[in-house]
Image: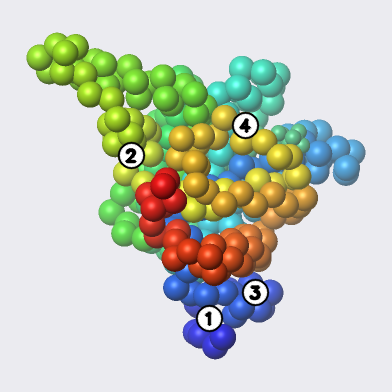
Amino acid sequence: MRHAIPAGLDRHEAAVYSRLDPGQIPRHIAIIMDGNGRWARQRHLPRVAGHQAGVAAVRSTVETAARVGVGALTLYAFSAENWKRRPALETGFLMRLLRKYLKQEVPTLNRNNLRLEYIGRVHELPADVRERMAWAQAATAANTGMRLTLALNYGSRSELVDAFNAIVRKAASNGGIEHLRIDEDAIHEHLYTSHLPDPDLLVRTSGELRLSNFLLWQSAYAEIYVTETLWPDFRGVHLLEAVGEFQRRERRYGGIETVHHEDTKARRK
Ligand code: FPP
């Protein structure tokens, strides 16, 4: 297969990309970034050093995804559960890291034409973090390229609870509960991700075989790819390897029936 290599890929990325089918790049990739703590422990460093090192992995992954034409990338940055269970010192560090990340990355996001958005119960985050989030979102809102979504204080079950409550509230203010209509489209429309296609590919780093309450509804038909690589060691080249595996699985599907990832509804049957 010979095709043009997108500008900006490094030598390793270009080698992996040259074996991909550019017509079958996933429209939406979701990533559970895991293993920061283990990465730090292996180096006898405090856990927060792993989170800090995770920023370089975010940067590389985001840029490579944008360069190869992924339409949407969603990163599980802080789960609602993490938020409650981790020591205050660690969550405080993560919040400071997020504020710093947002400030320093906006120029890179703009250079790559990326739109930054968020999902989760973000209203529960500290006010200074929310202010910085709103600033970064506004600063990238006019871009037309990849949608980068950070899941912050996110949990899939609480997202569904919020969606069902919104549906009921809407019916109540719209002629009463007898107007309640719940079907798959109504649920989809009230999820935080209503503007995004469902993920075609869900990546998890550091070897755990769990969804950890991430995009449960949306990932009903996603291909799941788990790598042993710890998040701070993950780079764009690893994302392209995941896309390669995704495409090999897609082709196997193609062999038995003509279903592919543009048509997730067909898979419901
Ligand atoms: C999981 O590792 C990772 C997190 C809870 C935080 C993710 C944060 C980053 C990657 C930092 C930067 C990101 C942004 C968007 C600023 P873990 O601590 O659960 O690892 P462990 O399972 O090895 O303990």
Q: Which residue is mark 3?
A: 16
As shown in the figure, which amino acid type bears the numbered disc 3? Answer: Val
Q: Which mark is residue 36?
A: none
The mark that comes first in sequence, 2 or 4, is 2
Report helix, strand or loop for mark 4. loop
Instruction: Report which residue position mark 2 lands on.
Output: 194
**What's the amino acid at mark 2?**
Ser
Q: Give the CA distance from mark 1 to mark 3.
A: 10 Å
Q: Earlier in the sequence, mark 1 or mark 2?
A: 1
Q: Which mark is residue 212?
A: 4
Name the residue tied to disc 1.
5
* Apparent side of residue 181 relative to residue 80 in the rendered image (left or right): left
Place of residue 243 in the rendered image (x, y in percent of width and height, measured from the top left): 58, 63
Task: Measuring from the top left, give residue 123's x and y in whole percent.
Answer: 41, 22
Q: CA distance from mark 4 to mark 1?
A: 35 Å
Mark 3 vs mark 4, CA separation in Å: 29 Å
